[in-house]
Amino acid sequence: MIGQDNSVLWIVVGAFGAICLFILALLARTVLTRGAPSRPASSDAARRTRRDLIWTVAPVLAFAFVAAPLMGLLYLRNTTPAAALTITVTGHMWYWTYKYSDSGDFTFRGPMIANSAAEKLPVTTPSATDDHIIVPVDKTVRIVAIATNVIYSWAIPSLGARIEAVPGWNGQTWFKAAKEGLYYGNCSELCGLPHAFKPIEIEVVSQARFDKWIAESNRKLSRVVATAGVGQ
């Protein structure tokens, strides 16, 4: 799962921490009272049996209670919900291509950075409509990652999004941006010397602006295809 709120995870970690501190306090109490004057042993066998049973079962129940939300969180992290948008990301040397397969099936290229001043090389792909991903806010976006030659890693840390792009294998993940704005990342796999110059940029916009961008992108692509047909 990508972009999920981690509040449940923090609750689980806090509960485990509290249990560990409680056990540590009991151990410290036992150590400190070991040298105290011995008290006469209780002859109440039933009380001792009940106490031993509680000390045995209580920790098991506590850990089971904490493990239940943790298992639910792990399930959610590995389950892809119904997506409003699917984008296919393909890793190349040294750039990405993006395909909006369910929004007109158009493709464009995100160019690499030319130098340390973060100047991007011009987009030379004839059918390019932009040089970065645009997605609607508060919508589930499915990312399908593939690679053409070596292993890449498409990562946007600020969105909690990261997926390996492996040749011959289609990997899937998803994210959901809670607010509009620009989000940046790069290839986090050491795919080659200039891998850090493969920028990733996501622009999160309103649904209305996204729909307008999709319509404009499809018109641009249609004109390019028509022009190519006339040239042939």
Image: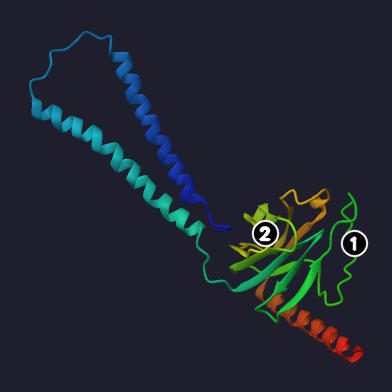
Label 2 is placed on what type of residue? Val
Can the viewer see residue 24? yes
Residue at the image position 74 percent from the left and 69 percent from the top: 98
Q: Quadrant of the N terminus?
A: bottom right
From the viewer's perspective, is 197 left or right of 148? right
Q: Residue furthest bottom?
A: 230
Residue at the image position 34 percent from the left and 42 percent from the top: 63
Residue of label 2: 166
Can the viewer see residue 204? no
Residue of label 1: 121
Q: Position of residue 107 (x, y in %)?
A: 76, 74
Label 1 is placed on what type of residue? Leu
Residue at the image position 52 percent from the left and 51 percent from the top: 6
Residue at the image position 64 percent from the left and 68 percent from the top: 137
Q: Quadrant of the C terminus?
A: bottom right
Q: Where is residue 217 in the image (x, y as percent from the top left)?
A: 77, 79
Classed neighbour count for the residue bearing mark 1: other residues with Cα under 10 Å, few (<14), some (14–19), many (≥20)? few
Sooner in the amino-acid sequence: mark 1 or mark 2: 1
Residue 183, image quadrant: bottom right
Q: Position of residue 93 (x, y in %)?
A: 81, 59
